[in-house]
């Protein structure tokens, strides 16, 4: 082995150790909840500069996302969190470049890892990185024109890197449900896991807002990591807003709001 190869390998090892250390610090700081986490929303026109989507994006402001902070604050009070205001959500710059397309949930582990690497590099390229990301969560919201019966791609929140990709409808009447998806993916970035099965039904008991309710159905609220309200063993509906959602004890444990 040549001296050059040894130096290159040592250099790569130093980089990997540095990244691992930074990721660990990011995880510890972001889940200490001693001060608010900043959630930055980066809007993207997902429909190739569709003018209707552009109009919607240009009218966005911080107030559209205020319900996210209200929800986090109200839920934090249930768990006596140190920080009374866990999050501060702000509108970031509009981006014109789309992230690499995410793999389907059924894609293999290797494909997901490769996408994760590509996505993190894209994030590094296209968003400002002057401030420390220890307490900043970047959420890239790809807005699509709304249409009857139209389905959106799967959204993703990564628990390493404090980044998320959200697919949402560019319609004022969809703002509240968009906020549910943003809050859901944000919670993924700080350690929360999904609480629904392959058929999207809520997993009992962790996926129920009130698992001790008698009779169990119909529930009146949704656990945020499900986003749907179980009405019976076979029926459920999407929550209309974050006011119909709660953070369950299991989710609270996962994000370090509640000790085991």
Image (cartoon, helix red, strand yellow):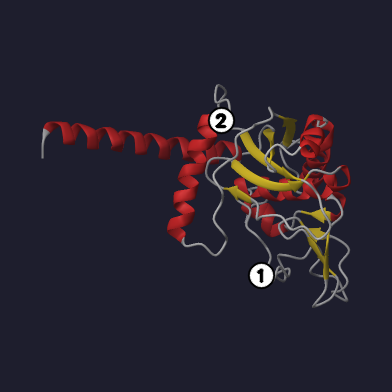
Percent x, y of residue 8: 23, 34
Q: Nearer the viewer, mark 1 or mark 2?
A: 2
Examine the rendering and report whether any part of residue 60 can be seen: yes
- Name the foreground residue: 142 vs 18: 142
Q: Observer-nearest residue: 199 or 219?
A: 199
Residue nearest the viewer, comparing 32 with 134: 134
Q: Residues within 10 Å of mark 2 (few under 14, many from 20)?
A: few
Residue at 77% from the left image edge and 34% from the top image edge: 54
Residue 36, quarter of the rendered image: top right
Question: Is 65 on the left or on the right of 140, as rendered?
Answer: right
Identify the image quadrant of the C terminus.
bottom right
At which x and y percent is residue 197?
66, 70
Question: Percent position (x, y) of residue 241?
Answer: 85, 51
Residue placed under numbered mark 2 in the picture: 126
Residue identified by numbered label 1: 197
Answer above or below: position of 254 versus 5: below
Q: Identify which residue, 193 or 62, lies in the foreground.
A: 62
């Amino acid at each position: 082995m040549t001296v050059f190869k040894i130096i290159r390998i040592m250099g790569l090892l130093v980089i990997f150790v540095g990244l691992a250390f930074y990721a660990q610090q990011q995880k510890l700081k972001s889940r200490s909840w001693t001060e608010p986490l900043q959630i930055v929303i980066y809007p993207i026109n997902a429909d190739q500069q569709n003018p209707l989507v552009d109009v919607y994006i240009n009218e966005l402001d911080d107030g559209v996302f205020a319900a996210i902070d209200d929800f986090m604050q109200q839920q934090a009070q249930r768990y006596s969190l140190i920080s009374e205001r866990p999050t501060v959500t702000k509108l970031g710059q509009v981006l014109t470049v789309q992230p690499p397309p995410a793999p389907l949930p059924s894609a293999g582990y290797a494909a997901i890892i490769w996408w994760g690497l590509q996505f993190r590099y894209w994030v590094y390229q296209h968003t400002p990185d002057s401030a420390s990301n220890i307490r900043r969560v970047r959420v890239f919201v790809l807005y699509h024109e709304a249409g009857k019966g139209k389905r959106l791609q799967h959204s993703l929140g990564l628990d390493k890197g404090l980044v998320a990709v959200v697919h949402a409808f560019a319609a004022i009447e969809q703002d509240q449900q968009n906020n549910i998806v943003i809050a859901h993916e944000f919670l993924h970035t700080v350690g929360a896991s999904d609480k629904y099965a392959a058929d999207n039904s809520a997993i009992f008991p962790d996926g129920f807002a009130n698992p001790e309710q008698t009779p169990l159905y119909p529930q009146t609220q949704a656990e945020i990591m499900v986003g749907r309200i179980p009405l019976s063993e076979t029926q459920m509906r999407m929550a209309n807003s974050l006011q119909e959602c709660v953070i369950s004890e299991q989710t609270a444990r996962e994000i370090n709001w509640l000790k085991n």
